[in-house]
Amino acid sequence: MALRAPLMKTSPSGQSSGRHSGREHDWQEPWQGHGRQTAVINPIKLKAMAMKLRHRLHNLEFKRPNSNPQLAPPREDGDDVQSRLPAKTYSVLYIVGPDNVVGLKTIFYHPFSLLLLACPAGILAHALDWGVGCVFWLNFLALVPLAKILGDSTEELAGSIHNDTVTGLLNATFGNAVEMIVAIQSIRTNLLDIVKASLLGSVLSNTLLVLGTAFLLGGLTRSRKRRGRYHSFHIVSEEFEKNGPTRLEKEQKFAVKSALISMAMLMFSCMSFALPTIFNSYPSDDSKSVLKVSRIGACIVLSSYVAYLIFQLLTHEKTLGNEEDALSPGLEEEEQNADADEDEDDVGPGLTAGCATLLMGLCTLAVAINSEYLVDTIAQVVRDYGLPESFIGVILLPIAGNACEHASAIRFAMQDRPGLAIGIAVGSATQISLLVVPFSVIVAWFAEKPLDLDFGALNTAVVTFCNLVVLTLLLDGRSNWFKGYILCCMYAFVGVLYWHVPASMEYRGRG
């Protein structure tokens, strides 16, 4: 059941519960009550917030059937509505319970959906032998919308289940499903260099391109208030009032503790790359020992990811949330309440669990097929078109897999929520480094493929130096457009580097 209501900034004069009829109501945002709960941001809540933001872009709001939203009583005939409305309102369609038709609209009504035409076209190109170049690019383009839809359907299924443990497992298994599938397909075809390059590129894409674009656009986006909980303009009030919501002197704020913990885990993953690389650089040529160290090290790194999830979700959930509350010590209570985090407990999914599962299954199958045809053509594309293999792995493949993270992080940053953008970008990079990389080594182990953690001196140096720069930029808990520009420039420099890397400097030891 749905009702359309203007979102209000004024306190309601009463409450209503249960299912509501389709009448106009004055609706109050959940954070504008008298109390404010501790803001706890973790990977599970990020999924719910990303899902809600996607629904809001379509002027929709899904609520759970047992939720009790704060609504004012319906207006009486002759009531002067305009006298009670604020200067600016906007309307949302308030929906109690999932609606598969409307929920699918929020997923597919997106510019990326046009690229879904490349999915069957890529399959036909392979079946009808349209040429290696056509097969490669069509299947590459098909992965972009499939990655987004797979991410959106994972959010919907996690919201339908509403269980933190299951949601955490879904986030771990399907959060980077495209990278995992591409890695498995590459292992199957013995392209072990592509496995390493694509995973390395995914880390660089998230920490440099996704985070850099989010900081850049977030620092240039207009804000209505001079000072908010997550942003501030370092100009006097008179100048801000005179120039309106200016873009000048804007600085966004985020919680440092959780960001530094994620960066520490990234640096730990760099160590897991660097030590086997240095070990293998000695002239002993003991490849069996390097492979044994890599496989045991992969199990150790994988255990650290499990401990990382336990730390975030169980033992220190409140500690990380308390730092979010300390970001606005000088704001008035009214301003704090206006900018506080929304309670996501009553945020409902747009799809039922069955529909979301079916959509995830279809997308996973499509990703497996398109990625198989894509990986099968890489060697011939490198040979026939002169496209560097390292450029394909480090730059091209991660762009397709990170489409969902890129869009969500930018949307959060432009709404003055840089902490959520960092949680998506750096969190995804951490998941790839601590989960997908050791997962790939273990899968290759069972497949009897010699995939190790020797990423090569150049690649290890690139990812280590990039992570050090990102760590330096996050230390002060502030972001602006210039920091974002620096990160984007670094990614562009890395792209130029891998375009010109000679074949002799690429990974050693092809399976």
Image (spheres, rainbow, N blue to C red):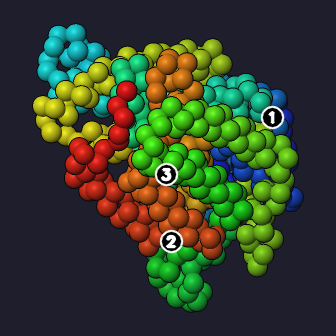
Q: Position of residue 89 (x, y in %)?
A: 59, 55
- Identify the mark at residue 480; answer none if there is no mark: 2
For marks 2 and 3, give the one nearer the viewer: 3
Above or below 417: residue 295: above
Q: Residue 238, relative to residue 77: is it above or below?
A: below
Tell me the residue at 56%/70% (across/down).
472
Residue 91 in sight: no
Mark 3, Cα crowd under 10 Å, few <14 / some 14-19 / many 20+, is: some
Mark nearer the viewer, 1 or 2: 2
Picture residue at 63% right of the left edge, 34% below the top: 296
Which residue in the structure is indicated by mark 3?
278
Q: Amino acid at mark 2?
A: Asn
Q: Work out how far the residue at label 2 is from the one at label 3, CA to CA, in angstroms.
A: 37 Å
10 Å crowding of disc 1: few (<14), some (14-19), many (20+): some
The residue type indicated by label 1 comes to: Ser
Tell me where residue 107 appears, x and y as whole percent: 49, 31
- Residue 308 in percent (x, y) is at 72, 45
Say which quarter of the image contains residue 142: top left
Residue shown at 65% from the left, 57% from the top: 264
Residue shown at 56% from the left, 43% from the top: 433
Mark carried by residue 67: 1
| Spatial separation of the CA atoms under disc 3 and disc 1 | 56 Å
> Is residue 91 shown left or right of residue 168?
left
Mark 1 or mark 3, which is nearer the start of the sequence? 1
Cα distance in 3D space between marks 1 and 2:
38 Å
Q: Is residue 43 left or right of residue 334?
A: left
Q: Secondary structure at mark 1?
A: loop
Tag on residue 22?
none
Q: Position of residue 239 (x, y in %)?
A: 52, 88
